[in-house]
Amino acid sequence: MAIPFVVHVNVVAILVSISITRVAAAAGGGGVHNGGGIQLIMVNNCGESVWPGILGSAGHPTPQSGGFHLGPGEETAFDVPTHWSGRVWPRRGCSFDAAGRHGSCATGDCGGGLLHCGGAAGSTPATVVEMTLGTATSPVHFYDVSLVDGFNLPVSMSPVGGGVGCGTAACGADLNVCCPAALEVRDGEGRVAGCRSACRAMGGDKYCCTGVYGSPAACRPTIFSHLFKAICPRAYSYAYDDASSLNRCHAKRYLITFCPPQPS
């Protein structure tokens, strides 16, 4: 079984420092973000390509045309507006046509196989990074990693600076290696490519926190969400898992890492 993600301040600080330096060098800058929005830095630490999908919440723009390719070891940085709300998720096992527009992904597909999701949501299962950003006058930013839509790749989101109390949201372990058979999603070669949440696999108000279970008091973690939480304690395991999963920070830059390195 993979080891759950554990935050070690020195390890995270070194990773952030190295990543920001490399991004700044590639951009020809000094690593200081002077834009009016919030900077997201995405790093692919996986041994395979990842196609990040991006979706703005209702009334919010979708940056980067909603998706792009990020090869192993590659990284990119872009700004999102203040007060932006939306989600980021990894797509894996993708192939697209010669024009790079249409194809399919083993997990996280969007819009029926689009490279640029362009406002289309991703299919489940997928590990989701969610954020609701503050403004210049109220600069508190909320963010989390959620397994409510299932899991397909390890992901973390950590602030660059921001002061005391800023946490790392993460599911750094590979849930696919211990996914219950009833929740497995396999790719064309028979390998486990994703792990569905109980809600997505079986439905029903109890698993989905809907209907009579649609409140924090009524919706309690199930055996499956307990499993997810034991392996990824810093991620949402079900809809009302706020207490140990929601982070807040004042930082103006955030590092989203696919397959974050595990402390030795």
Image (cartoon, rainbow, N blue to C red):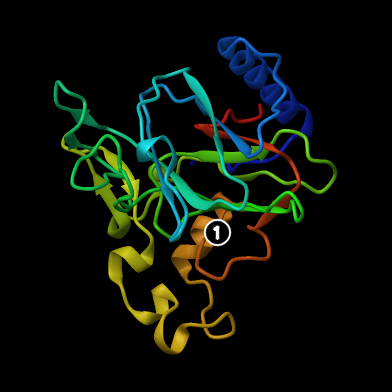
User: Is 166 displayed left or right of 104 in the figure?
Assistant: right
Q: Position of residue 250 (x, y in %)?
A: 76, 46
**Which quarter of the picture shows residue 35?**
top right
Q: Position of residue 165 (x, y in %)?
A: 81, 49
Could you classify mark 1 by the number of other residues whose Cα lies within 10 Å: few (under 14), some (14-19), or many (20 or more)?
A: many
- Which residue matches tag 1? 236
Q: Nearer the viewer, residue 194 or 93?
A: 93
Q: Give the structural element (helix, strand or loop) at label 1.
A: loop
Above or below, comparing residue 236 to residue 72 in the picture: below
Above or below, comparing residue 51 to residue 197 in the picture: above
* Identity of the residue drawn at 55% across and 59% down: 236
User: Is 140 displayed left or right of 88 in the figure?
Assistant: right
* Identity of the residue drawn at 78% across and 28% down: 10
* Identity of the residue drawn at 61% across and 9% down: 28
Q: Position of residue 259 (x, y in %)?
A: 50, 32
Is residue 2 visible to us here?
A: no
Above or below, comparing residue 146 to residue 10 in the picture: below
The quarter in which the C terminus is drawn is top right
Q: Position of residue 111 (x, y in %)?
A: 23, 48
